[in-house]
Amino acid sequence: MGKPLIQQRRGKGSPAYTAPSHHFFTKLKYPKKIEGRGEVIKFIDDPGRTSLLVEILMENNQVIYNLATEGMKIGDEIRINRGLAGDISEVGTLKEGTPIYNIELRPKDGGKLVRGAGSVAYIESQDEDNAQTNVLLPSKNIITLQGNCLATIGVSAGGGRLEKPFKKAGKHMFAALARGKEFPVIRGSAVSAYNHPFGGRSFGKPTTVSRSTPPGRKVGHIAASKTGRKKK
């Protein structure tokens, strides 16, 4: 009897294949109510994120957390809707071409987009009549947001992280394990027969599966009429 495929085991949601969120520092959301100014007092290395977190003490003694901005240092002043690097502002108040990250997809959702290390989006244009803002994402897609969505000005810290290679597979394994990522990703034909329909030493197994194959086991060419190179 074979084993479930790796995507079936991950989709089941067992602790072995879920992200260890109990090790993460915080869920990192913008507060529902934020105003005034604050000061950067600490940097935090969160194992669940690729960029450093920054702890900000506001003038009303409120403590908030955000992704660090490139070039930020302890003692920097952070203000709301001022418009400088590191500040948290509504996208509708920013000029065209302003770099932003940690962007709210909808007002008060806490920040959903552009949160990876070194990532940045740009204000594309402002539609003042409809109070909407067009934002150019790192994927080159342009999305339209409400003008009162929050974002942080600047570039997320930690750029160039991927330029340093993993020299050992073990280092890569522990880095993936800390965030609940799948590693290593291997070919189906390279595993044992009970792990995958294409596995085993007897090569030449068909890579086509039926249209009625159960979800999760639909791997390879699904209901393909023909495969391989076209014959002349």
Image: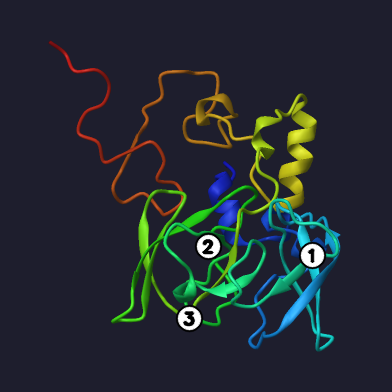
Could you tell me which secondary element the residue under label 3 belongs to? loop
For marks 1 and 3, give the one nearer the viewer. 1
Q: Which class describes the residues within 10 Å of circle 1: few (<14), some (14-19), or many (20+)?
A: few
**Which residue is pictured at 37% across the width and 30% down the height?**
207
Disc 2 from disc 3: Cα separation = 15 Å
Place of residue 32 in the rendered image (x, y in percent of width and height, measured from the top left)? 63, 86
Q: Which is nearer the eye, 156 or 11?
A: 156
Residue named by callout 3: 148
Give the residue number, with chain letter if any, for mark 2: 113
Drawn side of residue 133 relative to residue 200, left or right: left
Q: In what element is the residue under mark 1?
A: loop
Instruction: Compare marks 2 and 3 and give the one earlier in the sequence.
Output: 2
Q: Quadrant of residue 137?
A: bottom left
Dot 1 corresponds to which residue?
76
Cα distance in 3D space between marks 1 and 2:
24 Å
Which x, y percent locates residue 181? Answer: 66, 48
Give the residue type at disc 1: Asp
Q: Identify the residue at image location x=77%, y=69%.
A: 77
